[in-house]
Amino acid sequence: MAAKKKPAPPSTTPARRRSQEWFGREGKMGFIYRSWVKNRGLPHDQFDGRPVIGICNTYSELTPCNSHFRTLAEQVKIGVWEAGGFPLEFPVMSLGETLLRPTAMIYRNLASMDTEESIRANPLDGVVLLMGCDKTTPALLMGAASVDLPTIGVSGGPMLSGFYRGERIGSGTNTWSLSEDLRAGKITEHEFHEAESCMHRSHGHCMVMGTASTMASMVEALGIGMPGNAAFPAVDARRNVLAREAGRRIVDLVKQDVRMSKIITRAAFENAIRINAAIGGSTNAVIHLIAVARRLGVKLSLEDWDEFGRGVHTLLNLMPNGKYLMEDFCYAGGLPVVIRELGLAGKLNKNALTVNGKTIWDNVKDARNDNPEVIMSFAKPFKRDTGIAVLRGNLAPDGAIIKPSAATPELMQHKGKAVVFEDIDDFHARIDDPKLKIDADSVMVLKNSGPKGYPGMAEVGNMPLPPRILKKGITDMVRISDGRMSGTAYGTVVLHVAPEAAAGGPLGLVRDGDLVELDVKNRKLQLHVSDAELEKRRATWKAPDVKPSRGYVKLYIEHVNQASEGADLDFLVGGSGSAVPRDNH
Ligand code: FES
């Protein structure tokens, strides 16, 4: 009979790895922690103290943008094995933007809790986050930030370009334009359906510079992703190589104890804000990055978005602001070219560290632009001075934002009479009514679409225009709401008004015919109604009746912060670290 083999000794590394608190144990607990994991055929020496890497996977058939993540996870695993680590893949709640109702955003915080608790509760030393569709990226970054282990983000990559009748069509962006063409009678139902089949033709996330591509760019900009993370298409072999390299690299980060908080610093956020302006990125990045910063204890406010975005130009001629798509961006050289331009223009914290061990400047200083029509230079940009503008005034005491690169320049200074919709149902019920009193100079105001009011702060801020205005060939009007806008959308759309109407913000007091002034240059959003009149209205104002009796939505409504604070749940702000004090048996 073979001699009884002793359990693996604890790690001999100077700092005992976190995973050894499980796998390096003697006696009953060591047996429990190892034996069940051995059920897939792992040898005893697998538990010898090598870095244990969690691969946090948001694969789901209900999240079309993440449908290739099994392959991606396999590549990360190969990389981890190659570097002498021990990979363990685990699922967390996945959030598919197009299927989840009432909005994926309401579940971002729930998925972040799942991520945080899954990482902390398990024997992991480091983690690779697999992220793609819009909310999966911030949810996983937020959750991982609250644990603060060594972490690398790997994005799934954008889809190949959509093509319809010889023209590029972009996710979402052309969904909005085609549906407006249909409403205006410019195309038939048949053509509409044909375009639907031509838009999304490979694995990957939306291939315009929408929220998913923006957040993948933010992962690279913050240094928490590998160079190339933003733009390699999902089906490009280089995406798999990137995943494999991330698998190798996370093992080093664990050995060197380079935690997430050493990478995502205040300097990294400043870079990300400027890079978001240079790519013409989504307004959703504002909420998500503030939420991630607050998890890490980094001070980041709306004012920072205004300050660091000022004087930065949009360099990319990509939808929804321009005409090309993410595949074109990749072939032009991708995000390193943009970052290099910012570095040369003196708008980059060059020493910010990234997960590959180099500074952000080292990663990009030799980047080459292979298509100046897609990526323009800082000296001759696609659009000038297009950082996210933060507006204030009696209509938005805690701020509101607008994306100048997606707006109509002539409407950026505008006064018009409000046409008010009490909520999105009211909007849908009346917008096609030929008797609706509205003209091209009106300001469309949508209430109760914020975090508490919708609930979940849906992407409804880019309200479609009334058919009779569209038929005149007018495609943009000033629109204001406490909701969000899809990153694929465009228009002169003021978003994230805070406090929201449902939380008692002044937006809830606006009435039809009130004069509203938008002045982006002076960062002003003003309701020209006297304070006395507003006080009178406030006395009769009633909060909307959104009071679920149970479950997550009840928790969400009771605890969600306003958009200006990242719309996180109040009790999730900050982190709890990685310590777990007790055994499970
Ligand atoms: Fe998933 Fe756009 S729907 S990224």
Image (tube, helix red, strand yellow):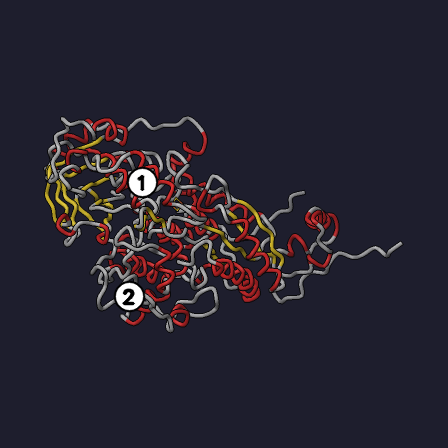
The tag earlier along the polypeptide, 1 or 2, is 2
Residue at x 47%, y 54% (from the top left corner):
235
Residue at x 73%, y 56% (from the top left corner):
44
Q: Where is residue 568 in the image (x, y as percent from the top left)?
A: 38, 44
Residue at x 33%, y 38% (from the top left corner):
458
| Residue 447 in the image: above or below residue 359 | above
Structural crowding at the residue carrying mark 2, measured as other residues with C-alpha within 10 Å and reported as few (<14), some (14–19) or many (≥20): some
Q: Position of residue 321 (x, y in %)?
A: 26, 53
Would residue 497 be found to the left or right of residue 48 on screen?
left
Residue at x 26%, y 54% (from the top left corner):
322
- Per the image, label 2 sits on a secondary structure element best described as loop
Q: Are marks 1 and 2 in contact (CB under 8 Å)?
A: no
Quick check: is the Cβ at mark 2 less than 8 Å away from ligand 1? no
Which of the 4 image quadrants contains residue 47? bottom right
What amino acid type is highlighted by mark number 2?
Pro
Label total for image: 2
Q: Residue furthest front?
A: 165
Q: Position of residue 430 (x, y in %)?
A: 21, 27
The numbered mark at residue 269 is: none
Circle 1 residue:
459
What amino acid type is highlighted by mark number 1?
Glu
Which of the 4 image quadrants contains residue 91? top right
| Residue 90 in the image: above or below residue 350 | above
Would residue 269 be found to the left or right of residue 583 on screen?
left
Toward the viewer: 151 or 486?
Answer: 486
Q: Position of residue 323 (x, y in %)?
A: 27, 54
Toward the viewer: 66 or 256?
Answer: 66
Toward the viewer: 376 or 224?
Answer: 376
The numbered mark at residue 372 is: 2
Would residue 18 be found to the left or right of residue 349 on screen?
right
